[in-house]
Image (cartoon, coloured by chain):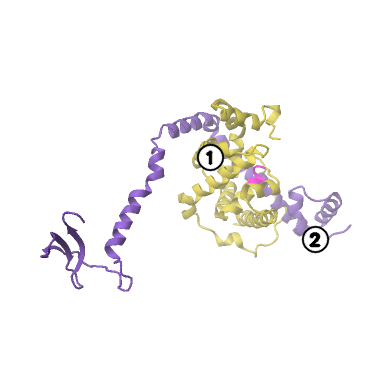
Amino acid sequence: MNEGENGGVPDDALIRTTLAGDDGAFGQLVDRYKGRAFAVAVGIVGDGDDALDVVQDSFIKAYYKLKEFRFGANFYTWFYRLLVNQAIDRWRKSARSAEVPFDEKWLSEEASPPDAFAYPRTPEDLVRDRELGDALQRAVDALPAYHRAVIVLREVDGMAYDEIAKVLGCSVGTVMSRLHYARGKLKEALKAHREG
Amino acid sequence: MTMNCVAALERIEAKADGLLPPEEEAALAGHLAVCPACSAEEAAISATGPLLRAVTGIRANEKTPAIDAMWTRVRAGIGEAREAPRRPLWAARWAWIPAAFALAVLALLFYPARTDRPPFHPRTFDVAVEDVESDVATVALVDKGEDLPRVIWIIEDAKT
């Protein structure tokens, strides 16, 4: 039940302490989830500075909504709902949503079956092929907002289907459908990049 | 258990998410070993996650100092929100009253009590004060807009 990572103070206890007036307890929650929150935010909004703002705003909002938190529920699922909505709102308002063109060749079904290819799997590998990372990010940006959120929550944060469904307020079937769609688009973007 | 391409393609995503039963995963592995097309499809799907994490990792590395200082930023934001001037609760609760009063006055001005007459919507509000002789002091405010003059306000004995 909301145990802290590595055996720390449980989330519920930190929330109770915060509500009792100790803001330092909320600081521990921030420190606990800021890394994961940033990873999700940057996956959705695509820009590091925007992601920092989203994470900050989400934590501030969570602080003021903490009295609405139902004890026994999962804090990071509850918080992630705020985070994802903030990220999607931010992305919709930003210039990125207006300027990123969707390249039709990413949808191409005519690409021949690719031969064996070793995709980069680590940041170190990706540094050597920065264009591939940029192509992937463009493909993510071109996804509809909630499809983007699903693929980021699943692939970057490692959330299970039912947890994603709770965060996004939809069914597990919808999560699987959106994930399938998003993976297909990203797969085509990777193929197009390799053949481009 | 053998598997064809259709069945294999249906199971690749489940394998990527670790949701495939062991016997199906073994069957899929057997098919991928002999089918280059399905193998390439599986490689592309399986690469998505690590690539996205790699891209995120690069962006996170670029922002490590700011992420480390997140609590400082959040605490400052909480402080700013606390200090922001707020309307008193009574103002928020009773703010609707002046607006409702203004609407009521406008309704009385433009909608006569007799319901068989159409609402009065003057294009101009040309008001003149006229005296009417009577036993009591009477002041009538008359609208001389496009329609026939209408008395819109009567003041008798200094009372409306």
Q: Identify the residue at horizontal 21%, vertical 61% (top origin).
A: B153
Residue A126 appearing in the image: no
Rendered location of residue A173, percent (x, y): 70, 56
Up/down of B154 relative to A162, above or below? below
Residue at image x 57%, y 32%?
A30
Crowding at dot 1, Cα within 10 Å, few <14 / some 14-19 / many 20+, comes out as: many
Pointer 2 with pointer 1, Cβ within 8 A: no
Residue of label 2: B7
Q: Residue at x 16, y 68 (%)?
A: B144
Percent coordinates x, y for residue A151 in the rendering: 64, 50
**Magenta highlight range:** A153-157
| Mark 2 residue type | Ala
Specify the colour of chain B.
purple
Q: Secondary structure at mark 2?
A: helix
Give the amino acid type for the residue marked by disc 1 in the picture: Ser
* Relative image position of residue B57 (x, y in whole percent): 61, 39
Q: Is residue B129 magenta?
A: no
Q: Mark 1 — residue?
A: A58
Label 1: chain letter: A
